[in-house]
Image: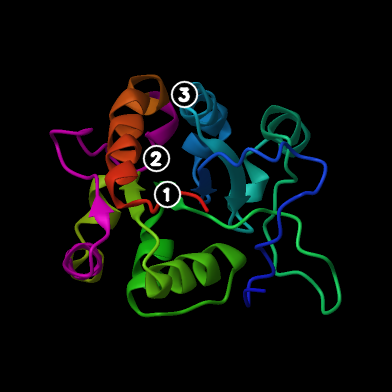
Amino acid sequence: MSAAGVGTTDPHRSSERREVLYVIACGSPLASHVGRLVDLAQQDGWDVCVVTTPDGAKFVDRPALARQTGHPVRSRYKNPGDPDVLPPADAMVVCPATSNTVNKWAAGITDTLALGLLVEGQGKGVPIVAVPFTNVAMAGHPAFRASLARLGEWGVDVLFGDHVLPLHPPGTGEHHLHTFPWAAVLAAVRGLRCSVSPAA
């Protein structure tokens, strides 16, 4: 059992195990559209579980995502003695990743379930894609750039830059949701498959 309280498969699910992708959504308006990524990943053959940060939970439709994935949407550490409810992750994608989560992750902080999963997963060698969605002011802080560089040095696939999506001015994020390149995120996730060990 992991410290984050995930790792046991549902006995009612098919015995033919698919690769499991954790989609981790942080507190951004883009999180309200994360169902698009779930749909694309499912079409690509992944068994998808959604985890949010506490702020990310404010933006998502938890019941709808639970129906879509067949798994509960988690945002907090489980209580002692509570059963594990998600299968173990073969890969993870953090999308949208906020500057707050990126900086804490790079510092090894685990004060949310999402961060605990990322830090633990990275230590276990789980392949991870990080897709920041932030504004030009937040992205301009030296700590954010340093954190992205550090994560990249540690093997995280960081999908960020004007070639992915140009940064937007503060307060305008909701006006740029329709241009977000979900297909590019899926392509990066698909690239993780070469790092995923075959299921037992």
Q: Amino acid at mark 1?
A: Pro
The scheme the figure's colours follow is: rainbow
Measured Cα–Cα span from mark 3 to mark 2: 28 Å
Q: Position of residue 65 (x, y in %)?
A: 68, 33
Residue located 32% across and 73% down the image: 106
Q: Are marks 1 and 3 in contact (CB under 8 Å)?
A: no
The 10 Å Cα crowd at callout 1, few under 14, some 14 to 19, many 20 or more, is few
Specify start and end residues of the magenta stretch as a single range: 146-175
Secondary element at tag 1? loop
Residue located 63% across and 71% down the image: 4
Measured Cα–Cα span from mark 1 to mark 3: 21 Å
Residue 91 makes an appearance in the image: yes
Query: Any magenta on residue 167?
Result: yes
Secondary element at tag 3? helix
**Circle 1 sits on which residue?**
198
Residue located 19% across and 57% down the image: 140
Q: First in sequence, mark 3 or 2: give its number.
A: 3
Residue 146: mark in rendering: none
Q: First in sequence, mark 1 or 3: give its number.
A: 3
Left or right of 145? Residue 174 is right
Q: Nearer the viewer, residue 200 or 40?
A: 200
Q: First in sequence, mark 1 or 2: give its number.
A: 2
Q: Is residue 162 above or below residue 26?
A: above
**Circle 2 sits on which residue?**
171
- In the picture, residue 14 is in which quadrant? top right
Q: Nearer the viewer, residue 176 or 155?
A: 155
- In the picture, residue 116 is in which quadrant? bottom right
- In the picture, residue 180 is in which quadrant? top left
Q: Position of residue 111 (x, y in %)?
A: 57, 76
Q: Position of residue 164 (x, y in %)?
A: 20, 34
**Circle 3 sits on which residue?**
40
Q: Is residue 166 above or below residue 104?
A: above
